[in-house]
């Protein structure tokens, strides 16, 4: 957590036993986030106490995407599966600043890939490009 860093970053770390953590890293500080209510959600801005004002630039859609994913997950009335998560990643609520973000005038950001990892079963589901336009391929590791 304390190596020399030239820039800020975010890493999600998970293991086959179900452990998961999100590491929010600035150049000189860090926080570790754990699941809340069984979910760990992150977009492109800091959410950890003490780091929330560390961003010099927050994409305009980041907070909306965070709130939208939180709503989708917390609204579920049953345990979620991979197919549910794939549909969440295809969501266009708040377009053009939606979870599934497309190229739009005045913005350089878009969804370039959607990844869903299943560490316990050794599978990674990947859609390269917008997941509403590309199928998820399954890779075993």
Image: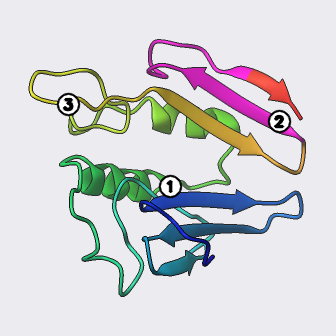
Q: At x 81% / y 64%, what residue is drawn?
A: 18
Q: Is residue 125 above or below residue 25?
A: above
Residue position for label 3: 96
Residue position for label 1: 73
> Residue 5: x and y, percent?
51, 65
> Residue 76: x and y, percent?
53, 54
Mark 2: few/some/many CA within 10 Å (<14, 14-19, 20+): some
> Residue 51: x and y, percent?
35, 79
Nearer-N-terminus badge (1/2): 1
Q: Is residue 68 above or below residue 94?
A: below
Nearer-N-terminus badge (2/3): 3
* SS at circle 1: helix
Mark 3: few/some/many CA within 10 Å (<14, 14-19, 20+): some
Q: Is residue 86 above or below residue 128?
A: below
Asked if residue 4 lies in the magenta stretch, the reply is no
> Is 53 on the left-hand or right-hand side of 43?
left
Which quarter shows the N terminus?
A: bottom right
Residue in front for this viewpoint, 141 or 8: 8
Q: Please tell me whether mark 3 or mark 1 is closer to you in this view.
A: 3
Query: CA–CA distance between discs 2 and 3?
Result: 30 Å
Is the image coloured rainbow, by chain, by secondary structure, or in one colour? Answer: rainbow
Q: Are marks 3 and 1 in contact (CB under 8 Å)?
A: no
Q: At x 90% / y 43%, what residue is drawn?
A: 121
Residue position for label 2: 123
Query: CA–CA distance between discs 1 and 2?
Result: 21 Å
How many discs appear? 3
Query: Which portion, as a residue range, is magenta?
Result: 122-137
């Amino acid at each position: 957590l304390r190596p020399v860093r030239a820039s800020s970053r975010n890493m999600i770390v998970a293991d086959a036993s179900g452990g998961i953590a999100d590491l929010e890293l600035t150049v000189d500080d860090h926080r570790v986030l754990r699941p809340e209510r069984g979910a760990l959600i992150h977009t492109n801005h800091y959410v950890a106490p003490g780091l929330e004002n560390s961003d010099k630039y927050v994409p305009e859609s980041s907070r909306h995407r965070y709130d939208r994913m939180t709503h989708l997950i917390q609204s579920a009335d049953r345990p979620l599966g991979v197919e549910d998560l794939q549909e969440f990643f295809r969501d266009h609520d708040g377009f053009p600043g939606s979870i599934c973000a497309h190229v739009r005038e005045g913005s350089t950001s878009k969804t370039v890939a959607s990844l869903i990892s299943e560490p316990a079963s050794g599978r990674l589901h990947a859609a390269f490009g917008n997941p509403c336009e590309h199928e998820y391929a399954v890779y075993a590791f």
